[in-house]
Image (tube, rainbow, N blue to C red):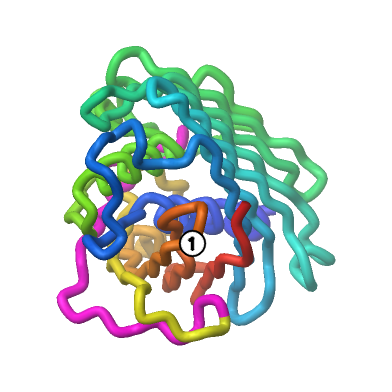
Amino acid sequence: MMRVRRLYRSIIVVFLVLMGGIASSDVWAEPSSVQSLHPLHTVAHYTVYIHGLRAMYLSVTYSDSHKHYDATVQGKTVGLIGLFLPGNLYMHAEGGLTTEGGIKPETFTSSGYFHHQDQQLKMVYKGDLPVVTKEEPQDVGREVVSNQARTGAVDTLAALIEVLRQVEITHHCAEINGLVFDGRRLSTLQVYPVQNTPSIVDVLNAPSKEALRCDFVLHQILGFMPSEPGKPSKLHQLQPGRIWFQNVPSIGIVPSRLELNHPKMGHIILVLNKTS
């Protein structure tokens, strides 16, 4: 059971990093008006690979009305991993948008079917405080993240929207430092530009001179499960990685590839398949 949970949570973490670092450059710059920076509706499809094995398909949908955002992620295991560890996941978030490009998260829902067991988590915001209203099943023994510690943190998908809006305005890979709370774990996320960015050669099976790379570091700081005495959880380790972005015609800038060395799951890669 714990192995299955680690698989899904690791994939969610990778998705967070993938979408939490969306960036663009001046060559892709669009009109300065915030309202015209992003399509009203975007769908992107990804494949997740773990240790070189195809593990999961992800579908990401995002829409906004310039005053409100709505984001959804759906995924299911495939290949050999899907055969032995069948399951799916779902995430949905909504909130308000400001004219300056900021966000006001309102709700976050995460659910899935892991190893013949349903799991659900619901969270609402009371000002700057994310509050868990439903968690099934509960992780007995998990370290509690206090209200004070998680004040100002945002959920996985709110982080996506916030960074996306800000980067669309600045048109470059900006340095980002933020707190992310998924309802159980509190993490820091740092995204920063790469000074010398090489051309990508294996994102969509073709070279791309217009790909942009950003590096990142993800670090869980609270919300750990108890570990063996004298053996702290490997998740205390920093998780460095890198992300590439491409400009897709009629869609705009989307993450096209991510690589992450996870302390428990090993080398994880996400690749963009198609957009619509």
Where does residue 160 sit, x and y in percent of width and height? Answer: 40, 43
Examine the rendered structure and indicate whether residue 251 appears above or below residue 65: below
Write the start and end of the magenta stretch as one range.
Answer: 179-204
Q: Residues within 10 Å of mark 1 (few under 14, many from 20)?
A: some
Using the image, determine if residue 61 lies above or below residue 121. Answer: below
Residue 130 visible, this angle = no
Which residue corresponds to the image point at 34% horizontal and 65% vertical from the top-left?
239
Percent x, y of residue 29? 27, 55
Quarter location, residue 47: bottom right
Q: Residue at x 45, y 39 (%)?
A: 157
Q: Is residue 63 left or right of residue 245?
A: right
The answer to whether residue 180 is magenta is yes
Q: Position of residue 81 (x, y in %)?
A: 75, 68
Q: Residue under circle 1?
A: 248
Amino acid at dot 1: Val
Q: Residue at x 47, y 69 (%)?
A: 257
Q: Quadrant of residue 46?
A: bottom right
Residue 78 is one of the magenta-drawn residues = no
